[in-house]
Amino acid sequence: MGAEIPSARPVTEPLPPNAFEAAPYRRGTFRNASGRATHGLAGALRWLLTRTRGPWPTHVEDVPVAPPVARVDDGSIRATVIGHATVLVQVDGLNILTDPVMSARIGPTPWTGPKRVRPPAVPFELIPPIDVVLLSHDHYDHLDRPTLRQLVQRDNPQVLTGLRVGAKVPSKNVVELNWWDSHSICEGVTATYVPAEHFSGRGLFDRDKSLWGGFVLETPHGKVFFAGDTAKGQHFRAIRERFGPMTLSLLPIGAYAPRWFMENVHMDPDEALQASLTLESQTSLAIHFATFNLADDAYDAPTHALARAVQHLDGMPPGADFRVLPFGEAAIVRLGEGHEAAARRRYA
Ligand SMILES: [Zn+2]
């Protein structure tokens, strides 16, 4: 009997036929590519009535760090987590800010909604001039009108976002994109809006009427993926297939409990780790935790669970890491050719 020749090729099912299509849109609302629906009002009510909240501090004071440099043009990618999903990405002389939220509270009015437990790690006046804002979707913890107004007044950055989000953005310099639409930021730098598994809406009457997604930035110094807000899904494989291995991925790890309610909208840390492996990300950076108390996971649960998941894996694959950095501290990433080549070999 001949021995079976082991295959180095990872066994993967084919991607769903709609993996690279624009966002499904029917009767005025967008859908997830998977067709998965998120919980409606009844589910939300059940959660609110049965929830057991993990403990959170009311105020966390970070050790001050050196403010970000004005520009980065030394061939590296620099990412500074300012808080929650707000990340300053500096590359190729460009300053890009993801989902800028500096407000003390996020909600329909200044006196409603969750309060932030830690001030922004970089105060607004120390954020260098912003050229481009990447806005993933319209939820209050991602689209903060007061912060956007301040940014528009100071820098008038170009705002890239999903279809139908523009009306909620206090700027005239907005470009709306469907999934897989690309926009050239400048020569050599392109942003593509990519799918996420999530939902949208800021009130009772705009549920799923605007699009949600993430962004891939292609730059001369590597590829940056900002996942936005997302559950696990096949979109990570599609993104890997379209763009190749990521140099830097900004992946959400918090607001995941209880799973029965949150699993359709937010990844847990283990799923975020799986996503980083699927993306063959050289460096992944944890975001969306320890800033706003949005779900039932305790303040420090996401980072502990991520550490456990990495341990369970027996460490990260060679050339890859998943970092949880102190807020305000910059991750400096240089495109590792060894990593790209290894990733390409593993996948080919
Ligand atoms: Zn959201």
Image (spheres, rainbow, N blue to C red):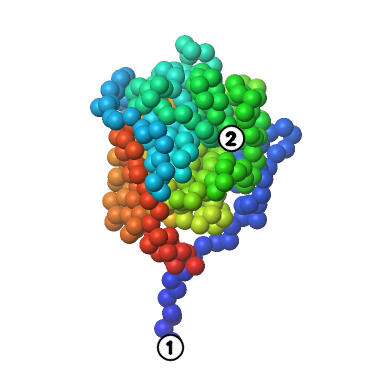
State the image coordinates of residue 79 (x, y, percent, origin top left).
39, 39
State the image coordinates of residue 91 (x, y, percent, origin top left).
44, 43
Q: Quadrant of the N terminus?
A: bottom left
Q: Residue furthest left?
A: 63
Q: Which residue is mark 2?
A: 160
Q: Dot 2, how many residues are within 10 Å of its Cα: few (below 14), some (14-19), or many (20+)? A: many
Does residue 260 sit above or below 316 in this rendering? above
Indicate the secondary structure of the residue bearing disc 2: strand
Does residue 11 sit above or below 141 in this rendering? below
Disc 2 and disc 1: Cα gap in Å? 59 Å
The amino acid sitting under disc 1 is: Met
Numbered label attached to residue 1: 1
Q: Dot 1, how many residues are within 10 Å of its Cα: few (below 14), some (14-19), or many (20+)? A: few
The residue nearer to you, when weighing 145 against 221, is 221
The amino acid sitting under disc 2 is: Leu
Residue at coordinates 45% horizontally, 73% vertically from top-left?
A: 7
